[in-house]
Amino acid sequence: QVQLVESGGGLVQAGGSLRLSCAASGRTFSNFAMAWFRQAAGKERDFVAAISVRGVLTDYADYADSVKGRFTISRDNAENTVYLQMNSLKPEDTAVYYCAARKSSRSYATSDYDYWGQGTQVTVSS
């Protein structure tokens, strides 16, 4: 089992920044690909960003087109934590953000992930 706990959400004005954190426990964190998804009210859960196992390979992260150039995913295997740095936030970024883990290569698909956090709310005001 892997337990995931997100933090760092909140209310921010458009153009501002937030950094989300996801602390993992229970298994060897470095063996898991990690991802962030988000779910706006009344909508499906969508892929945001993913990072490969260990995060040391080139070209090891993927992003949704809607956040490319604004969001950065990173991981600290010593701290068992994955981060999502969100810059130039827009009102359409408002959603509950979820951290997810899978013991395989990174993926865009919600169904590929085995472990999920409880989510953290991000609200961007215009």
Image (spheres, rainbow, N blue to C red):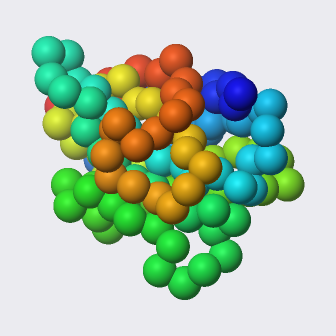
Q: Is residue 12 visible?
A: no
Q: State left or right for residue 86 relative to residue 104.
A: left
- The residue nearer to you, when weighing 27 against 10, is 27
What is the number of callouts on the image? Answer: 0
- 123 horizontally vs 83: left or right: left
Q: Is residue 53 visible?
A: yes
Q: Is residue 49 above or below residue 91?
A: below
Q: Is residue 111 above or below residue 17?
A: above
Find residue 42 and report its horizontal and vertical position in percent.
14, 15
User: Residue 10 placed where, x, y %?
Assistant: 46, 23
Q: State the quadrant of the N terminus.
A: top right
Identity of the residue furthest to the bottom in this view? 58
- The residue shown at (20%, 55%) is 66
Q: Residue 33: image x %, image y %?
A: 57, 54
Corner quadrant of residue 6: top right
* In front of the other: 65 or 102: 102
| Above or below 91: residue 82 | below
